[in-house]
Image: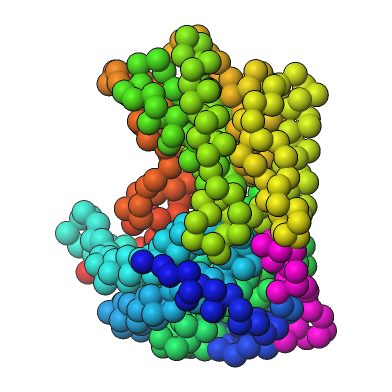
Amino acid sequence: MLEQGAIDALRAIPVPDQGHHIDGRQSPAETGEVLDVVSPIDGARLCGLASGSAADMNRAVRSARAAFEDGRWSKTAPAHRKKVLHRLADLIERDALELTVLGVRDNGTEINMAYKAEALSAAGTFRYYAEVIDKVYGEIAPTAQNILALVHHAPVGVVGAIVPWNFPLMIGSWKIAPALAAGNSLVLKPAESASLSLLRIAALAAEAGVPDGVFNVVTGPGAVVGEALALSMDVDVLVFTGSGATGRRLLNYSAASNLKRCYLELGGKSPNIVFNDAPDLEEAARVSAAGIFRNSGQVCVAGSRLLVQQDIHDDFVSALCAHARAFRVGDPLDLKSQIGAVHSLTQLEADLGFVETAEAEGADLRTGGQRILEETGGYYMQPTVMTNVKPTDTIAQREVFGPVLAVTPFKDEDDAIRIANSTEFGLASGVWTENLGRAHRMIAAIRSGVIHVNTYGGADLTVPLGGVKQSGNGHDKSLHALDKYHDLKTAWIQL
Ligand code: ADP
């Protein structure tokens, strides 16, 4: 159980200025430049963050490459890496509250959610890949008798990881844990506005016994240090979660440098489809509201398009709006809050802009649509429901990444499928129906990496997460994630 007193004590501790984590040590930006980290809780400066340059990034990549080549980690036994990564999970659990409060001060996620989805989930991810790695076997191919053909799993070398601000520890560990477990070295570029908890993870990794140079973190503007990482000739694989616009740039950087493999987890505009035969419409309304509004809609798989069958539309929307209004939005470090802050003023203004555009295009604002708690200095927004949204409207096509739900009615199954598949995205979706045949038809017809049936959100580490269409490629989580961090190497041996 989290205690308010312990949280309040931690939030009162000033955060010192942060350097990069390169070669096992904190180091300032070579230029001495510092970025201001602003807390979305109150709009106040939280600390300074090293504003890296290409030179800093190249130093980190050199350190990762040297560590990889001399084998201080890459050539250790999987059983050794397992032990170290379990130790890291222990340390994350030891410091879970501290890590969580630091992360919440940085990015504004409500603490009950952050504690589980950030610190505890990161610890679980390190344990999962620690447990997996000494159970990955190679193959002996079924060749002719005079040949022995072996298929080895080799680490790829230096992995570059660029991660976003919404769930830095959860998403970061989905990449860090399998990359390290497989024996790679890593250079991580966190989001400017969510670097603090990941810098702490790097320090804990060093304490757990991850050797210097194996896990580096370089902070600063994406367009500077992220670009340098993606353009590096010495990075073998790039893994990314973020916007489609940045994903496109990364592919260009790869083409302009060493053709490094790029795995991209991009945005979504996920349809949540409610049929009139849903088993429990009240429950569907409650879960659908949580599926868009938790973490202020700043969730890549958020069910941001609600498609409701015509004959239940009005009742369902009323029930959902009641849930939307009932959420307690406020200070994310107050245990009573259910939704915290929008992560930045820029994001808040973009969210409000989407509401304006939707109204201009003919949608109706049913609830929310306003900034609230402005007197705190922080960035808070009411859960917002827009109805009468046409499938072609901006709000039905573009990812908002805010607490804004677009509602569109549909006639029948075919209509629902057509609308659901009518965006460039294909990350997640949901279907509510009691009809088993219909559920399976929808699973087959909807183009998305994840489809929830009679629930929305949820999923654990045992299953892959990845998008289709312009939501990306490759998978985080599950055993499949290891594919990104291993090369297959064939040995063809004449006997
Ligand atoms: P979001 O909208 O979630 O902030 P971004 O794609 O802008 O998505 O950011 C995700 C991550 O990509 C962040 O760590 C950010 O710093 C980084 N990033 C942004 N621009 C670039 C770029 N040009 N090259 C490499 N990384 C970038």
Question: Is residue 389 left or right of 122 when viewed as pictured?
Answer: right
Residue 280 vs residue 259: left or right? Answer: left
Q: In x, y percent, where is residue 419?
A: 56, 20
How would you classify the magenta stretch by its main secondary structure? Answer: loop
Residue drawn at the location 33% of the way across and 70% of the way down: 127
Task: Give me the residue at 47% from left, 76% from top.
Answer: 6
**Residue at 74% over, 35% down:** 354
**What residue do we see at 65% from left, 42% from top?**
382
Q: Which residues are magenta?
A: 28-46
Quadrant in the picture for the N terminus: bottom left
Residue 122 visible, this angle: no
Q: Quadrant of the C terminus?
A: bottom left
Say which quarter of the image contains residue 451: top left
Q: In the rendered view, does 88 fall on the left or right side of 469?
A: left
The one of 402 and 125 positioned closer to us in this rendering: 402
What x and y, as percent, mark residue 267? 60, 44
Q: Is residue 185 above or below residue 115?
A: below
Answer yes or no: is residue 465 visible: yes
Give residue 392's quadrant in the image. top right
Q: Nearer the viewer, residue 406 or 448?
A: 406
Image location of residue 266, percent across then percent down: 59, 47
Q: Say above or below: 209 vs 164.
A: below
Q: Quadrant of residue 128?
A: bottom left
Please name the colour scheme applied to the rendered image.
rainbow
